[in-house]
Image (tube, rainbow, N blue to C red):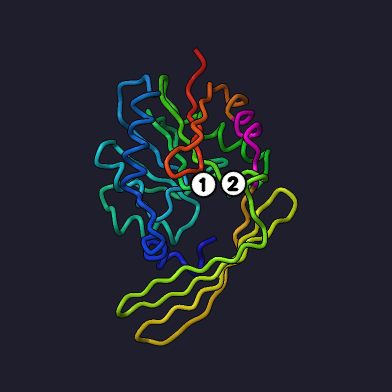
Amino acid sequence: MFSNSAKYYDELYSALGKDYLAEVKKTRLFIQKHKKSTGDSLLDAACGTGIHAGYLNRYYQVEGLDIDSKMLSIARKKHPGIRFTKGDMISFDLSRQFHIVTCLFSSIGYVRTKTNLRKAIKTMSNHLLPGGVLLVEPWFTPEQWNPGRVFTLQVDKPDLKIIRMSHSGQRGKKSIINFQYLVGTPNGITHSSEQHVLGLFTHEEYLDAFHSAGLKVTHDKKGLAGRGLYIGREKS
């Protein structure tokens, strides 16, 4: 997925102004409100380069999981004290459970289909200890998606210049984002491209996935950064 951009991922979202620390502080409040277990083990599914995991590790015993080897390599270098495992959020099996499972920054969209959404929520719920809590930050719904949007992002540092241009499209219930990168370093200028495909799920489909996993679900419309948040707990 991030085959060409993984090594610049942190720089790009820093330039975008994404406030991971503020999001983690909000995450803690949701955990404190909804978690009924007393432990603090946490699995960050689809952890990417481990920025959320690094901040969460200040408060919890964190592990990370991601399908992208390049992203995991970066996460391991930044946070050698955190255990990171390669795995698909649809079907991973760590043979252990956690008090908290998170899936943030809309990574859930990468499961692409409603069937895979249900599988992923079930897989994550299977890794919850009794009284634990599952937090999932959704991708856009079909109504929220805006095909035809063109967006540019720029990194401007002394030895690193990046221009990322993206175009948003749609195919059925999948969002298509085509990225073009121009990267300038002292070694020269390179050009690369990536295509990302994410499922556009309705609010009802998210609720259905949690209910199918046997979880009671609460939806916070704002969530961590305006995209909302689904909080799953065992049904009492």
Mark 1 vs 2, N-terminal side? 1
What secondary structure do most residues of the magenta stretch adopt? helix
Magenta segment includes 175: no
Q: Residue 86 appears at what percent x and percent y?
A: 45, 50
Mark 2 neighbour density, 10 Å: few (under 14) some (14–19) many (20 or more): many
Q: Residue 136 appears at what percent x and percent y?
A: 49, 37
The residue that mark 2 highlights is 140
Circles 1 and 2 in contact, beta carbons < 8 Å: yes
Report the amino acid beneath label 2: Phe
Mark pair 1, 2: CA separation: 8 Å
Task: Give the residues drawn in magenta, as a range.
Answer: 200-209
Magenta segment includes 206: yes
Q: Residue 84 appears at what percent x and percent y?
A: 37, 48
The residue that mark 1 highlights is 106
Viewer-proximal residue, 80 or 206? 206
Viewer-proximal residue, 93 or 34? 34
Task: Say if 194 sits above or below 29 in the image.
Answer: below
